[in-house]
Image (cartoon, helix red, strand yellow):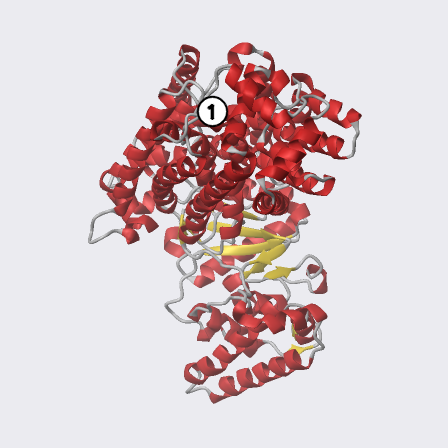
Amino acid sequence: MDKVPTTVFLRTTSGLVKSAGAADVFVYNIGVISIGIGVSLTHLTGPANYPGGSIPIASAIATLLMFFIALAFWFWSVAIPRSGGLYAYVTRGLNPALGFALSFVDAFAWLFYNALAATYITSIGFGPLLFNIGVFSNDAGLVRLAQEIVQPVPQFIIGTVAVVLAGILLITGMRKFFLFQKILFLIALIGIITSILFLFVRSNGEFVANFNTAMAPYIPNAYDTVIEAAKTKGWRFSGFNWEDTVKLAVWPILPLVGGIFSIAIGGEIREVKKSQGIGILGSIIVAGIVFVLVGHLSYRVFGTEFQGAVAFNSTADPTKSTPITPFFPLLAGILAGNVVGSVLISLGFLAWAYFWIPATLVYAERAVLAWSLDRLTPASFGYVSERFHTPVVAIVVTVILNIAFLYLFLFIPFFSTLTLVLAAMLAWTITMVAGILFPFRAKELYKRSGASGLDFQGFPLMSVANFLGLISVLILTYLLWNDPLAAGHSPQSLLTIGSVFGFGFAFFYIMKQRRKRQGIDIALAFKEIPVE
Amino acid sequence: MSQQPDQILSEGQEYERSALTLFGESKHRNIDLRLIGSIAVRVRCHQYSKIISSARKYKDIDFYALGNERGKIKEMFLDLNFEIDRALQIALEEMRYSFFHKDSRLRIDVFFDELNFCHRLDLRNRLSVEQSPTIPLADLLLSKLQIVNLEAKDIEDICLLFLEHPIGDCDKDCINVGYISRLLADDWGFWFTVKQNLAKLDSDTKKRFQKDSNSYLRIQSQLATLDSRLLLETKAWRWIIRAKIGTRLKWYRTVEEGEIF
């Protein structure tokens, strides 16, 4: 590869004003991290299922592991600053067929998780919002509506609307998308800051009083009853232990994964070294700090035992829990004790939940476009609408797939139990291996890239970062593999991942042959850095 | 376009000839396609073209057009055996097309509606002020003066424009200073960049035209006229507010130059 004549495989352009700056990248990534979803999932699953785990310490461990993974991806984004994410990296750095298959399974997995995010619009957003307004304004109708809205059919309808709106937003163009993200970030920020402020100023006694008042129609003396009921059903708060804490770390790390999603839009980012640095590493550090802070404060105010018990009861004994799933924004809204406070919190968490949807669509859509530009999918996938000037077909395809996944997730039991995060781990593991080897296997491309300027005394730090990233990915994979709640290794999940991966491989070779018959050697494309 | 451009397109005159051929084709197809950039300056400044450095290299031909003519423009270049850079088309959301001639690899960039570099220059209402193969002279000058890091070739182009064309208050074969000063009185960042560039030109021309006092004096006179009009123009409220912040806040957009892709 290092003997490739550069005049053939590298083209230069000038005068490019790219659409995304450091702030856009930071907001994009922190949006996919979705602090709101991260806090909600960690606080719902953590204390209930890992009773000895400490959320603040687990969050710190998660941030550290994810930091090394992010560092590896930051090097990649500097070395190959192009859109399409790990597709661009592995096809150029290791093997084209492998790169395509990994990108295919990676995009599939994240689109599937985007379906999950569409359900959070109701369970983390609208549900708590309506419930808390209903409680504080004594409107039983709103409380009933909150309970109804988190049922599968309303979740599908609202989720579909959310995904379609996200698609329409993307069709209007990336500049509008980045502007929208900034507005959403402001609302989300207000929500999380309001939560933290209430956690700071309120005491456990105040929360107990508010919770008992809010829950009076359902459970008398609710706070203590919830804890007692959980113990009766076998849940025990065992006190801090390291084993549960390390296991718990998978929950904050799953949202932190979003911190690297800007690799999908690498070609649209200006001053890539700085912007991706702030966007990738900055978003993970900031989110990690918020996770630690909220974890610490919520233990003090909600009570460690209560958080575990109320979440445990929501599945083991729903009559002894809140009428809708006790996600963090519901508890924080009750803590606020008034309509204004709870609305600000709920709207913020609704914004956090919605952040995921268009951003993940972008992630998958950019992969689809990258395949199309390398002629691995029909040219129509890269079609740019004359009216909107955006790749409408790629956007519509990802929207339709997302809605299909939402339907499957909500209504087909097989899919509701699928966990595909191991697909991403597989993709990352191979990307890290490719990253270790890239400076040596593709010397010419590496030398011409921004990453080579970061060498330490001639040794490529990109390899070091990818080695550290690989270790972190392997630790994370081990934790996920052995945790049936977060991922596990159920046959149906592994079979699905394997099938999608295999389909990706087969598709690559079918397209390669098809293009060959058309007189096009697609192998040539993989010897150059992909175009903008 | 069927000639062997590797041999002949290395000369600026050949680029100019190709540019005018393409312009002629666009007229024939009733498309308002205008030249911008260094080739446009060449086209408008024949009398003083001798000052162009013999080492000057041209890499491409740049055009400007209205966005509602995208379809016709794409069709024209595809008919002329060019291929479009689909990746750039997607990444820039059709604000710019790049075409490569299938044989010669001659590169054509077409910018739509606005020139969006260090500063934004909206030309949608400007094509009607002058019928010419290029955008109006004032806009051609501004397209150079908006560059934060002026290169020698840009300075050369600005000097050419100042030498060849008078400054006045109309657009007919004239650099419309009234239009420039009104535009910049609304945008402090753009105004500041232009002021900095005028200062750079002032010092550069001293060295550049040491042996040509006539040219030096003409450029100095043009610079002074432009500078005074920029100062005298009544500023918009947002210009005044932005001026208070000054250079503490970045006043221009970063343009990626010579990027490998």
Residue A7 to residue A304: above or below: below
Judge from the rendering whether residue A353 lies leftward or rightward of residue A284; answer left or right.
right
Residue A293, x across and y down, in percent: 49, 43
From the viewer's side, name the closer residue of B141 and A106: A106
The N terminus of chain A sits in image quarter: top left
Judge from the rendering whether residue B224 lies leftward or rightward of residue B61; answer left or right.
right
Residue B68, x across and y down, in percent: 68, 46
Residue B111 to residue A29: above or below: below
- The residue that mark 1 highlights is A109
Please name the amino acid that badge 1 sits on: Ala
Which class describes the residues within 10 Å of circle 1: few (<14), some (14-19), or many (20+)? Answer: many
Q: Is residue A293 visible?
A: yes
Mark 1 residue element: helix
Q: Quadrant of residue B179?
A: bottom right
From the viewer's side, name the closer residue of B29 and A403: A403
**Residue drawn at 56 percent across, 18 percent down:** A229
Q: Chain of mark 1?
A: A
**Residue drawn at 68 percent across, 60 percent down:** B127
**Residue drawn at 41 percent across, 13 percent down:** A490
